[in-house]
Image: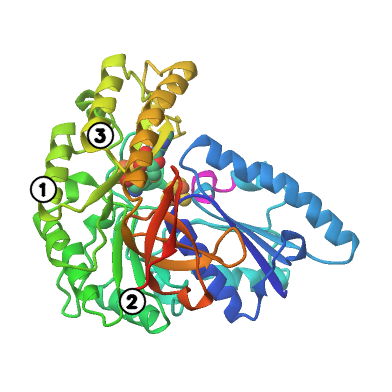
Amino acid sequence: MEKYFIKTFGCQMNVYDSHRVAGLLEKRGLSAAERIEDADLVIFNTCHIREKAAEKLFSDLGRVILIKQERAAQGKDTVIGVMGCVVQAEDEQIFKRSAAVDFALGTLTYHRLPQILDDLAQKKAEMVIDTEFPAESKFDYLGENTSQGACSFIAIQEGCNNFCTYCVVPYTRGVETSRPVEDVVREARKLVSEGTLEINLLGQNVNSYHGEDALGKERNLAYLINKISEIDGLKRLRYTTSYPADVNDELIDCHKNVPILMPYLHLPVQSGSDRILKAMNRRHTAGEYLEVIAKLREANPALRFASDFIVGFPDESDEDFQATLDLADKVKFITAFSFKYSPRPGTPAAEYEHQVPEKIKKERLAVLQDKLFGYQLNFNKEMVGKIVPVLFEGDGRHKGQLTGRTPYMQNLYAEAGDECRGKIVNVKIETATMNSLSGTIAGD
Ligand code: SAH
Ligand code: SF4
Ligand code: F3S
């Protein structure tokens, strides 16, 4: 095997996992293929969160079977693997649903990939699946994380104990576990020494982080943020995704006292109706959510918020939906991800009575998005004329152009020389659309 190709669906955690798996494969001497057709090993890292996300995998697998057949005609073998949340949810059914799959790895076992590849190569097995929730932590077996460029992710926490009634994550990622403080700090230092300027601490419920320090004492996210912020050369720090009821005062203080903590926070609310929040088994009311936002704003008036919304949860009435619109008006989120409720097999809400008809879900989503997109555009437009520090990462759409991110995670395009790549540079914002800004380099 020489070339691999990984296609990633789903959340940042999957993006991070794919990066770590790529690291494992490169250690074995494989390199990334530019096209799926050139790959001896194809891996799909999958998402089960909504029906559409899961279905995408099976249409992709249909296409990859044809590629496998074409390659076979040229005498080339192709190994096809599936990893991530769909595997955890479907288990052995995955082989029944697609004949293309040679191996399937759950979310907590991808460190066992080298062994699986060896077994397949030696024809010890026809098909291999591993969906265990193992006692060992995969992070202890993965080797070192490598820099992902100027912005790097570090998974610090995985799994979720919240069991929101619509959500598959507690089943696909298991119970909450946190990596030890020292492991995370070591990883952060290494990434910064390799040129990372911005670190994003990742977890499904990141602010319930409770990793052990060197003396075995449990520490929270605020402690970890303070520790990491001491690393010389690190310029920006973020964490995602947080659960509103787990935002404590120490974490709020970080937004006041840690200068490198960026003024942007993704804090999903899901609904503005207390009745629906209760049915969702969220441990917060709309009022409590707004209180957390108010406290955070007091700690840092520059702070702006992003959120997730679900419309058409079972039994959601027009009044409930109106409460969601009202909450969106109160917070004026600068970014938001909104979804039609998707019943997931095995979750309690899928069995609830009074499922909302698709037509109403669609209408409500359009109304909500109209509002959310309006606030997003307004915020972007407010930036025009301002000078903003931008961390440049990659190539822009045209030659001579680079793309980067503002402190508020806005995408920005600017004419910029290669010397700006991987650096934070001041930019004067010239134009704004809903999805991006453009500007000119403003120097010091
Ligand atoms: N751990 C994060 C994100 C979980 S999944 C958190 O708790 O905030 C990302 C988003 O997908 C959720 O915030 C929710 O808005 C949405 N989502 C989850 N399950 C869903 C479902 N069954 N139907 C529609 N949207 C869903
Ligand atoms: Fe899912 Fe709720 Fe956990 Fe988020 S907090 S991952 S929505 S169960
Ligand atoms: Fe999807 Fe799994 Fe992430 S279901 S959203 S890839 S945790």
* Pick the front one: 305 or 289: 305
* Mark 3 lies on residue: 281
The answer to whether marks 2 and 3 mark residues whose Cβ atoms lie closer than 8 Å is: no
Which dot marks residue 65? none
Quadrant of residue 300 within the rendered picture: bottom left
Residue located 52% across and 35% down the image: 51
Q: What amino acid type is highlighted by mark number 3? A: Asn
Which dot marks residue 188? 2
* Mark 1 lies on residue: 295
How far apart marks 1 and 2 lie (CA) works out to: 29 Å
Q: What element carries label 1?
A: helix
Camera-nearest label, 1 or 2 = 1
Camera-nearest label, 2 or 3 = 2
User: Is residue 132 shown to the viewer in this render?
Assistant: no
Q: How crowded is mark 1: few (under 14 residues within 10 Å), some or many (20 or more)?
A: some
Q: What amino acid type is highlighted by mark number 1? A: Lys
Identify whether 130 is placed above or below 330.
below
| Pointer 3 residue Cβ closer than 8 Å to ligand 2 | yes
